[in-house]
Amino acid sequence: MGPTTVATRGIPRWVVVLAGVLMAAAMLFLSSPSGAFASASAPDTPGGDQEQTEFYFGGVITFDGEPVADVVISVDGGGFEAETITDAEGKWRLYVPEKDEYTLVVDEDTLPDGVIVDPAQLPEGMQPNSGTTASFDVEFGATGTKIVNLFLGEGERLTTSFWDQFSERLISGVNFGLLLALAAVGVSLIFGTTGLTNFAHAEMLTFGAIIALVFANMGLPMWLVIPIVIVFGAAFGWALDAGLWRPLRRKGLGLVQLMIVSIGLSLAVRYTYQFFIGGGTYQLPGAGAPRDIRVGPIAVSWIDLLSMGISIVLLLTVAFWLLRTRIGKATRAISDNPGLAAASGINVDRVIRIVWVLSASLAAVAGILWAYFRPGVKWDMGVQVLLLIFAAVTLGGLGTAFGALIGSLIVGILVELSTLLGIPPDMKYVGALAVLIIILLVRPQGLLGRKERLG
């Protein structure tokens, strides 16, 4: 096959690149808090009123048992931002438009001198963001109300240098990228062997987290729960291929029809999850573990270390399977040329079945790690990272497992470092997608993808 040639006759390359940059800029604008479709609220003052909704954060700020007045508290997330001031009784309340992840910040300049938010007295499961004790990621539980009572204590306000923050977020980005890779490798293997873009892959992540939650609630330790989740994930992948995808392949459905089926399957399974577990967020054992393991400026929790260790072991196992085993070599052969592989005596259906089992197992484990990275098991948690998974696969090169790994690491690191570069927290995912668009304008086949002739 010859190199890829995309028809741009009569259109200079700089015009194509400029158009891509403008599209990325438009995405950033529309997703920003000040963009055309963003909702915002004017700062609330003691004499002003917030627009009341059914969702709000609230609480009391105290120091030595006494309320602290005139402390400024702000909330930011989902394209929304607002702030308020504690009243004479130390009480505050911030209304938000919907259930989402938000960042809650206490303005330390409005605290009494020599006083900080005491990290030892934070509500259970809450941890301060790096570099300060006055910024927290918060989200709602089963109800539309989240009470966050904060206690002040004497202490020195922390300041963290740019490079210390860079180091810590780089490690966090590697952790995020590794768990993305577990899911992205599965997507890439399925695409390489079948040509299917599987939108239901997100529900495989959610399935793993839900199964882990069920067995953890039975009192089983997580070291035993993870192998059980792998087995259930494998069974889920086997059932999907045996009950749905293989019959559709034998009927000769085209890739577009199969992709539409995967979208419908995704919606059906996702709302089935909601029917059984509801719309609340549930925590796995150990979620929100303190980051008390320090190496220089880098602070991590034992959950972070285990997550990265599990991801690395599984990814190395998949690499060995692809490069050294007969089934792995057959998988690569089918990905290169399915017709020739079948003519060579390879049982294509059997290999595809194994790929589905492997991909679902990896996705199930990724679901557990995602529940720990952004604490909480929720009915739609998988779809929250589906676009990033597709971005990683496309960036690395469609159909290449090793490309999916590299693309995942790039996306994970970009997402975690983006806020250091001035990108608002609720826009960090958009930044990674904008970089994806720009790179694909220069190299359409992705980093490790092969050039193919179009038409």
Image (spheres, rainbow, N blue to C red):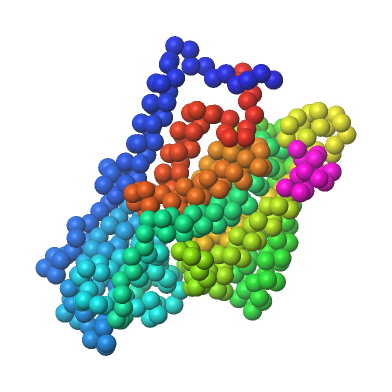
Q: Nearer the viewer, residue 330 or 377?
A: 330
The answer to which quarter of the image holds residue 196 is: top right
Q: Can residue 377 be seen in this view?
A: no
Give the magenta part as a residue range.
319-332
Q: Is residue 326 rendered magenta in the image?
A: yes
Question: Residue at the front extreme?
Answer: 296
- 370 in relation to 293, above or below: above
- 229 in relation to 385, above or below: below
**Residue 237 x, y percent position in the rendering:** 70, 52
Question: Residue at the right extreme?
Answer: 345
Q: Quadrant of the C terminus?
A: top right
With 300 as the anchor, is 79 left or right in this view?
Answer: left
- In the image, what residue occupies the spot 29% across and 49% down? 33
- In the image, what residue occupies the spot 25% across and 53% down? 40
**Residue 181 x, y percent position in the rendering:** 60, 50
Question: Residue at the bottom extreme?
Answer: 65
- In the image, what residue occupies the spot 72% across and 47% down? 319
**Which SS does the magenta portion mostly show?**
helix
Q: Nearer the viewer, residue 136 or 256?
A: 136
Q: Nearer the viewer, residue 392 or 187?
A: 392
With 335 as the anchor, is 83 left or right in this view?
Answer: left
**Residue 400 x, y percent position in the rendering:** 66, 38
Q: In which quarter of the image is the N terminus?
A: top right
**Residue 271 x, y percent position in the rendering:** 53, 56
With 30 as the anchor, is 195 left or right in this view?
Answer: right
Question: Residue at the top extreme?
Answer: 10
